[in-house]
Image (spheres, rainbow, N blue to C red):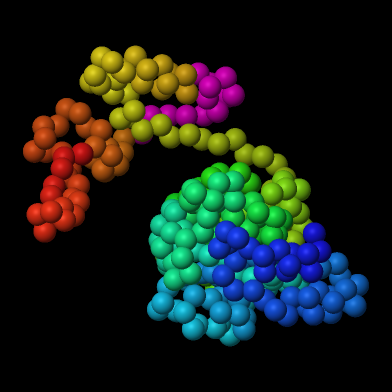
Amino acid sequence: MLVQESLERAHKDEFNAVVTINEFAQKQAQELSSKGVEPFPFAVKDVIYTKGIRTTMGSRLFQDFVPSFDATVVATLKRAGGVLIGKTNTHELASGATTTSSIFGPTKNPLDASRIAGGSSGGSAAAVSSGIVEFALGTDTAGSVRIPAALCGVYGLKPTNGLLSNKGVFPLAPTFDTVGFISSDLNWLKRLKKLLPAFSKLSSTPRKPKIAVPSWVYWWDKAPASYSKTVEEVVLSFEKLLDARSIEWSKVEMPLQRRLCGVDLAQSDTQRPRTFTLNENKGGLSAFPM
């Protein structure tokens, strides 16, 4: 896709995917071409710093913030010929899975404008799905690349945590935050090994994974009869799949997760963890056992 074509599509965006357009993109593409570098357009989630271009995090708190440097991943792509088309909408502070809470308003799903695009990288997924760009950056802490990619019918990749630098990325949960990629073409994701040094350093020798299976998934004997058999079949089928592929696995105790997920069915209601919701009618908090 040509940079000019991508710019034209960004200006005609009907899904609130792109919230800030880089009006110098065409000039930057021409400069790259004059140096013998083939430019390619890409978009960037609005929580990733872009030098000289507003980066709002989807929040009024940062609506006038203009970074003085590019995030490491953005700078790397630019050196490889990337031309930033614009910044894409994000759920405010990247803290949500719908991209409906943003100072720019909600992003619509290009597959069905009456539905959400997912989040928090919803703008990037919508920009790719609607054909504005073939490739966009997002961030993923707990699904923020994968969820919108799935809802918008495109590919989403969350690299191994820590593989890519988060310098210049607004933090949500630093130990989980990961720069991710959304594309309409798998070939673009393959090009990452050439464009990003960290990917090219990956070993070409595949390593066999080792799977930990929480012991508390074996609880069908305590489940209601209406679905205990289904639970048993699913868990045993998963074990057979691992064995068939010669994948090493073992049962592990995870007591904290067991309680947080509310699956300790042997506990009484008074022992189980409780979740709290705001009861507007009563003007206070109501607690419900998990």
Using the image as rendered, state which of residue 107 and residue 75 is in the foreground: 107
17 relative to 218, above or below? below
Q: Can residue 248 be found in the magenta stretch?
A: yes
Taking 102 as reference, is 287 left or right? left
Question: Where's the C terminus, which quadrant?
Answer: top left
Q: 60 or 159: nearer the eye?
A: 60
- Residue at the spot 58% in from the left edge and 85% down from the top edge: 68
Q: 233 or 103, which lies in front? A: 103
Determine if residue 174 is in view: no
Name the residue at 11% across, 58% down: 283
* 272 part of magenta stretch: no
Q: Quadrant of the N terminus?
A: bottom right
Give the residues in magenta.
Answer: 240-252
In the rendered image, residue 171, in percent from the top left (x then y), is placed at 45, 68
Q: In which quarter of the image is residue 26?
A: bottom right
Horizontal side of 66 relative to 175 (left or right) equals right
State the residue at coordinates (16%, 56%): 280
Looking at the image, residue 209 lies above or below residue 195: above
- Is residue 73 positioned above or below 273 on the image? below
Q: Please give the name of the residue rendered at 31% of the width and 18% of the height, measured from the top-left corner.
A: 227
Taking depth in this image into account, of 213 and 134 the one nearest to the observer is 134
Residue 39 quadrant: bottom right
Q: Residue 2: x, y in percent?
A: 81, 64
Give the side of residue 192 with respect to residue 260, left or right: right
Number of marks: 0
Let me know if residue 88 appears in the view: yes
